[in-house]
Image (cartoon, rainbow, N blue to C red):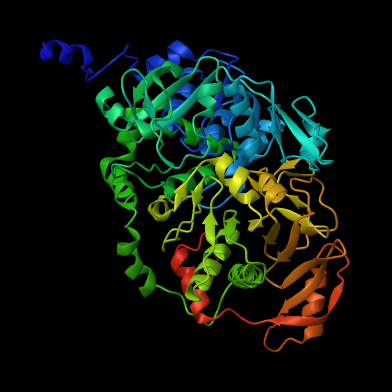
């Protein structure tokens, strides 16, 4: 009798209809011209995007694409003229450092439509679509140039509950299909995406036809049941499951079972260089997308040794093997770059501000801002003052490790106190009363307004999470190299309104906001150069009439300890500048 009931209540190893398909077949079956596609950013499926390029080559499919960040994979779609309209918060290169993409600029010049959004606003629009509500409120976008440009999908109203504040309303969005790469799924499509969480699976939930999911491996339904807290997408939201190990390459991939792999920096640099000219870009696409035939051909071309090296770097403890080499090759401390000077000055300002205002959370943008936050955090920890570092993609309370300066590096994931998504990070934690931020910027003006989107018809990179962060953090600082073209009297495009921007830290000076205007408070002291000469140099490299504080303070040179820690974080000097 008991065996009869055991049979009734037994779970099967594999359950449900199998949706496993070869990648080529899945794309051919489910992707149609003029589709509105969501392309996941934190779990980018380069394997699927490459296959779309092959199958729709010269067919003018006029896709509409929505994504958080249009990096390498979306650049290829744009460069092959497959995109009619791109909706994104970031449109540029990511590795080795953020920079404008000439491939995107050429596509825009040829007629590709673009909509600039902030990162969180896109996530919230997808969440609204998943919830099947018509709109969702936000603090983002208000007061920026985006508010004026996005009137069909964004509205500002008075709070209907009488607070007296303005409220932004984001129109829900429902793509036709979502494309993402994940750690694993069972044949029915029950999917574990993995870390970081970032946009979660809101794109798959919002899409009318669910998702095509490429995965590192296919697992049993029994495995899915045993790891149910990690499951992100139930099978009924998935159209096809395609097993493509290394499917996120050339991006990094963090897997809980230790099968992670590192971002392929040389590969990214090669494409960035090729993208500068149309002929070189098309030659690269022919070599790496068309001629390889399929994704297995792509992996064969990469080669086993290269893939295994990326696997080795994917180990979170790989920095321990790299550190001795980094220390042996440390440059002399007698010289340092403008970037190093700016980063050290910014870290000192962060330490001073965090101490005086008792901030508990520090969010940093990519690049020099990130390194300044890392340096400040370690300085504070040496004094037993704890501040939790936060990354917009959801890494909270992490401890930065040496040899990898990228803010999203997987090496820092195991040290997190919490891992959340964009809603939890820049939607909630940045909103905490004791939260501040530091960001890099394309341009900033005397009012603290930030522009990272557009200048004179030239596309920069876009907001990313910057607009969301500045709208929520109690205070934001900006870091940049001193440059008259970047410190301007008035930005031509307001990516982030400057009301909460308190300081601009450059390689030469610290500007602090007083009576609504950035005032010169500190200058970098150089041996053999008088104060008046330094002030003249600063004013000549600032785009507004500089007002001086009284008295001015001197910024002392970086110490050996500060420089050594910086250089351990960024041994390849991606953000520190060439010595």
Side of 477 relative to 424 (left or right): right
The residue under the point 85% across, 75% down is 548
Tally the numbered discs.
0
Above/below status of 275 relative to 153: below
Q: Position of residue 121 (x, y in %)?
A: 66, 35
Residues 327 and 474: in front is: 474
Is residue 276 among the parts visible in the rendering?
no
Is residue 396 among the parts visible in the rendering?
yes
Q: Position of residue 544 (x, y in %)?
A: 86, 63
Where on the picture, by quarter, is residue 233?
top left
Q: Position of residue 535 (x, y in %)?
A: 80, 78
Q: Quadrant of the C terminus?
A: bottom right
Side of 302 relative to 489 (left or right): left
Above/below status of 537 relative to 218: below
The residue under the point 47% across, 79% down is 332
Where on the picture, by quarter, is residue 403?
bottom left
The residue under the point 26% across, 29% down is 223
Seen as rendered, the residue at the extreme bottom is 528
Residues 294 and 442: in front is: 442
């Amino acid at each position: 009798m008991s065996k009869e009931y055991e049979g009734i209540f037994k779970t099967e190893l594999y359950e449900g209809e199998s949706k496993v398909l070869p990648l080529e077949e899945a794309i051919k079956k489910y992707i149609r011209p003029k589709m509105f596609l969501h392309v996941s950013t934190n779990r980018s499926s380069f394997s699927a995007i490459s296959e779309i390029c092959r199958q729709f080559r010269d067919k003018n499919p006029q896709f509409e694409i929505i994504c958080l960040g249009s990096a390498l994979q979306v650049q290829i779609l744009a460069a092959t003229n497959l995109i009619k309209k791109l909706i994104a918060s970031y449109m540029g290169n990511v590795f080795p450092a953020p920079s404008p993409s000439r491939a995107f600029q050429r596509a825009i010049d040829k007629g590709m439509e673009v909509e600039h959004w902030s990162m969180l606003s896109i996530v919230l629009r997808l969440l609204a679509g998943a919830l099947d509500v018509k709109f969702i409120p936000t603090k983002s976008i208000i007061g920026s140039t985006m508010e004026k440009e996005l009137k069909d999908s964004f509205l500002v109203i008075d709070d209907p509950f009488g607070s007296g504040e303005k409220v932004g309303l984001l129109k829900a969005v429902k793509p036709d299909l979502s494309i993402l790469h994940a750690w694993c799924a069972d044949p029915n499509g029950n999917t574990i995406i993995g870390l970081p969480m970032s946009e979660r699976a809101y794109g798959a939930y919002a899409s009318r036809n669910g998702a095509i999911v490429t995965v590192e491996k296919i697992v049993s339904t029994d495995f899915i049941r045993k790891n149910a807290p990690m499951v992100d997408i139930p099978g009924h939201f998935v159209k096809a499951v395609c097993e493509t190990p290394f499917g996120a390459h050339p991006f990094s991939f963090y897997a809980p079972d230790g099968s992670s792999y590192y971002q392929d920096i040389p590969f990214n640099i090669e494409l960035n260089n090729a993208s500068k000219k149309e002929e070189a870009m098309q030659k690269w696409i022919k070599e790496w997308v068309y001629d390889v035939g399929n994704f297995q051909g792509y992996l064969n071309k990469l080669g086993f040794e290269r893939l295994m090296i990326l696997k080795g770097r994917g180990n979170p403890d790989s920095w321990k093997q790299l550190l001795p080499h980094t220390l042996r090759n440390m440059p002399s401390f007698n010289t340092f770059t403008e970037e190093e000077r700016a980063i050290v000055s910014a870290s000192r300002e962060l330490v001073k501000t965090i101490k005086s205002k008792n901030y508990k959370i520090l969010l940093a943008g990519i690049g020099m801002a990130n390194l300044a936050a890392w340096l400040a955090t370690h300085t504070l920890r040496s004094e037993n003052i704890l501040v939790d570092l936060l990354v917009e993609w959801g890494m909270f309370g992490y401890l930065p490790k040496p040899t990898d300066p990228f803010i999203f590096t997987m090496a820092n994931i195991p040290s997190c106190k919490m891992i959340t998504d964009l809603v939890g990070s820049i939607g909630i934690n940045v909103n905490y009363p004791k939260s501040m931020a530091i960001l890099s910027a394309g341009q900033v003006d005397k009012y603290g307004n930030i522009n990272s989107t557009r200048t004179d018809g030239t596309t920069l990179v876009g907001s990313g999470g910057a607009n969301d962060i500045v709208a929520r953090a109690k205070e934001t600082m900006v870091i940049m190299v001193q440059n008259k073209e970047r410190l301007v009297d008035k930005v031509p495009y307001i990516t982030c309104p400057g009301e909460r921007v308190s300081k601009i830290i450059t390689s030469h000076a610290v500007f602090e906001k007083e009576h609504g205007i950035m005032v010169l408070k500190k200058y970098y002291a150089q041996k053999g150069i008088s104060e008046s000469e330094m002030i003249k140099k600063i004013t000549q490299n600032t785009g507004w009439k500089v007002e001086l504080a009284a008295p001015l303070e001197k910024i002392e040179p970086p110490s050996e300890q500060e420089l050594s820690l910086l250089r351990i974080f960024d041994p390849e000097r991606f953000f520190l500048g060439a010595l």
